[in-house]
Amino acid sequence: MERIAWVTDSTGTLDEELSMNEHVYVVPMVVIIDGKEYEDGVDLLPEELYRRMSEEKITATTSQPSVGKFQELYKELEKRYDRIIAVHLSSELSGTVSASRQAAQMVSIPVDVFDTLLISFPMLLILKRLMHYIDNGDSINEAFVKTRMYADNHETYVMIGSLDQLHRSGRLTNAQYILGSLLSFKPIISIENGVLHTKSKPRNLKKAEKQIFTDFRRSVEAGKVKECTILYGAVSEQAQRWKKMITEEFPHVLIHVSPLGSAIGVHTGEQTIGISWFNED
C-alpha cells in the first residue's frame, strides 16, 4: 500500500483528529509585524497577535511560505513516504499553491497539489474528504475530481471584525476605510471561486448576524447541509452562542468551531466571526 504524507498550510487550525494524525504536516505561513517575520503557529499564536494588535496598534501583513520551505519538507518526507498530497488555501488569495508546486518539481517523490479555493478550517475539511476517498480505494485522480465537486458547492460568510486592521494590512483602500468607518459598516465577506467578495455592508452587528443566519437557514432548510463550521477571531463566547443557536434550531447539523489562525487574523481582526458550509445533494 502506498505510503502517503499529507501536507497543508497554517491558515487552517488543526482539530484533534488531524493533530493526532502522524502523517499530516503543516507548513507555516509567515506573519510580518513591523518588519519582523514570525512563523504562524510556531513563534506567533493568535492570542499574542490579537493582544499586540489591541495594545500596540501594530502594522502587520502576511506572506506565503517560501519555495525553499516546501522543498526542505518534501525532501525530508521522501525518505519515509511514497507520495505527498498537499492541500492549500486558495491560489487566488496567496502564492502558497504556486510555491508548493514549484517545490514539487525539485524533489523525486510525486507531489500532488490540491487548490481548495478556500481558507481556514473548510480547507481542512477538504483535506479530510480527500483522505476519505483515497482510504476507500479511489485513485488520486478520482479523489481529486470528487473533492473538487464537493469543494465548489461551499458557502462561506464572514463578518469582518475590524476595518482598522483590514486597512492596516493593506486589504482596504483609504477611501473604503474612511467611508466604512463613517457609516459604521460591518461588511460580510464571501468566498466565491477562491476570491473574496463583499456580499453586503450591514450597518450594525445585529443586522450582519441576522443576514448570515438567513443565508445559512436557507441552505439547511433545503436539506443540503450536513455540517458547518463557525470561524472566529478572539470571540470564542460569541462562537459558542452561535453554536447553541444552530444546535437548538438544527440538531441534525454537525458543528465545528474553529479559531482563525494568525495569518488570517492579521487581515480581519479579533472580532471576526462567520459560518462556512458545504451544500450536498
Image (cartoon, grey):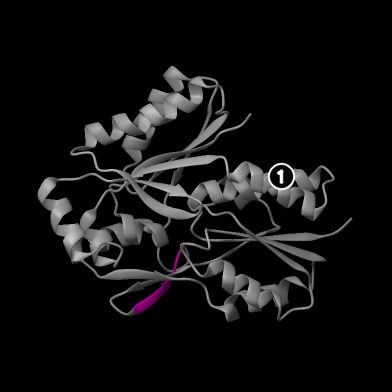
- Give the residues in magenta: 36-40
Q: Quadrant of the N terminus?
A: bottom right
Q: Is residue 149 left or right of residue 58?
A: right
Instruction: Identify the residue at horizontal 31%, vertical 43% (top origin).
Output: 235
Instruction: Identify the residue at horizontal 56%, vertical 27% (top origin).
Output: 224
Q: Is residue 120 left or right of residue 140?
A: left
Q: Is residue 272 left or right of residue 281?
A: left
Instruction: Identify the residue at horizontal 32%, vertical 55% (top origin).
Output: 268
Disc 1 secondary structure class:
helix
The x and y percentages for residue 72 are 64, 78
Q: Quadrant of the C terminus?
A: top right
Residue 37 part of the magenta segment: yes
Residue 78, image quadrant: bottom right
Asked if residue 233 can be seen in this view, the reply is yes
Q: Could you classify mark 1 by the number of other residues whose Cα lies within 10 Å: few (under 14), some (14-19), or many (20 or more)? A: some
Q: Nearer the viewer, residue 143 or 40?
A: 143
Q: Is residue 242 left or right of residue 131?
A: left
Residue at the limit of the structure toward the left, as seen here: 182
- Would you name the residue on which mark 1 appears? 146
The x and y percentages for residue 104 are 69, 74
Residue 60, image quadrant: bottom left
Q: Amino acid at mark 1?
A: Lys
The x and y percentages for residue 95 are 51, 70
Q: Nearer the viewer, residue 25 or 197?
A: 197
Asked if residue 128 can be seen in this view, the reply is no
Residue 163 part of the magenta segment: no
Q: Nearer the viewer, residue 175 or 65?
A: 175
For the stretch drawn in magenta, what is the main secondary structure? strand
